[in-house]
């Protein structure tokens, strides 16, 4: 695992070739009042470096699932006693996909896994104003996709709403292209220095225009 301090508040924990040959990024935002872990990886072992990193912190821990896919939720069991946030649609999506995912992708499991749902869900957005954190619905790749914006360090985590490699910026979509473009437009309303996704390299806000261009060429 690589641990990279991206900004004053954000640390990126990267598990190399974690699932289906792709790297997997877990973001930690150390806010003034709370710590925020974005996605929980492939099981309990995925979280060990993060839990070690935070072992002396006395701040409240908030966990966020960007969407329901296995590589983003299998470590939720480590946070049963914490607030886990997701979009309202994620609850049904986890249920519907659990058997398929644990059958097809079990070889990628790291440590223990358990079906643990977010315990705080929302429809459009939820904010932690005192920490400068906004979490909002932005459908595309999975239907229950959310994004996390840190206004202090101007980072935007879009989950898997960016493709997995620099050569393939358009993700697989479960919605129509116009709905996805609306999510891109919403991203572009924020002042962003760093765009973080589940598997691709760290980018800047110009990636959204590149995605638009790629969509127009399809």
Image (cartoon, helix red, strand yellow):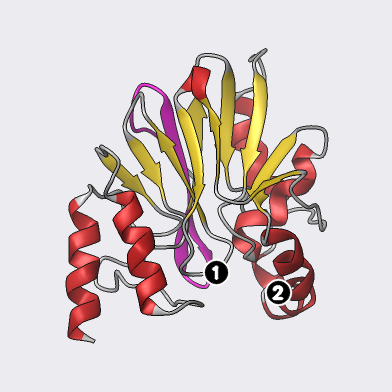
Q: Counting other residues with Cα less than 10 Å from the Cα at mark 1, is it few (<14), some (14-19), or many (20 or more)? A: many
x and y, in percent, of residue 161 in the image: 42, 63
171 vs 108, left or right, is: left
For disc 2, the marked residue is 101
Which one is nearer the viewer's eye here, 52 or 9?
9
Provide the secondary structure element on which disc 2 rests.
Answer: helix
Give the number of marks: 2
Q: Residue at x 53, y 59 (%)?
A: 145
Pointers 1 and 2 in contact (C-beta within 8 Å):
no
142 vs 102, left or right, is: left
Instruction: Give the Cα distance between marks 1 and 2.
Output: 14 Å
87 vs 152, left or right, is: right
Q: Which residue is drawn at 76% across and 32% down?
A: 82
Q: Is residue 19 magenta?
A: yes
Dot placed on the residue nearer the N-terminal end, 1 or 2? 2
Q: Is residue 151 visible?
A: yes
**Quadrant including the C terminus:** bottom left
Q: Residue at x 32, y 59 (%)?
A: 184
x and y, in percent, of residue 46 in the image: 63, 47
Residue 142's label in the rendered image is 1
Q: Can residue 42 be seen in this view?
A: no
Q: Counting other residues with Cα less than 10 Å from the Cα at mark 2, is it few (<14), some (14-19), or many (20 or more)? A: some
Span colored in magenta: 2-24
x and y, in percent, of residue 60 in the image: 67, 20
Q: Does the magenta stretch include residue 132?
A: no
């Amino acid at each position: 695992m690589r641990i990279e301090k991206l900004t004053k508040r954000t640390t990126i924990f990267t598990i190399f070739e974690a699932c289906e040959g792709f790297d997997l990024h877990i973001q930690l935002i150390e806010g003034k009042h709370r710590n925020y872990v974005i996605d929980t990886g492939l099981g309990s072992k995925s979280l060990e470096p993060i839990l070690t990193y935070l072992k002396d912190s006395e701040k409240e821990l908030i966990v966020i699932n960007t969407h329901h896919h296995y590589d983003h939720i299998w470590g939720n069991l480590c946070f049963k006693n914490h607030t886990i946030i997701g979009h309202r649609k994620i609850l049904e999506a986890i249920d519907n996909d659990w058997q398929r995912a644990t059958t097809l992708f079990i070889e990628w499991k790291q440590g223990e896994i358990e079906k643990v749902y977010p315990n705080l869900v929302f429809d459009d957005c939820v904010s932690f104003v005192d920490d400068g954190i906004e979490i909002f619905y932005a459908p595309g790749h999975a239907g229950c996709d959310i994004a996390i914006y840190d206004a202090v360090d101007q980072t935007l985590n879009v989950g898997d709403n960016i493709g997995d490699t620099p050569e393939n910026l358009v993700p697989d979509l479960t919605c129509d292209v116009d709905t996805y473009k609306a999510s891109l437009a919403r991203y572009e309303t924020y002042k962003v220095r760093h765009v973080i996704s589940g598997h691709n390299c760290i980018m800047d806000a110009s990636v959204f225009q590149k995605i638009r261009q790629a969509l127009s060429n399809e």
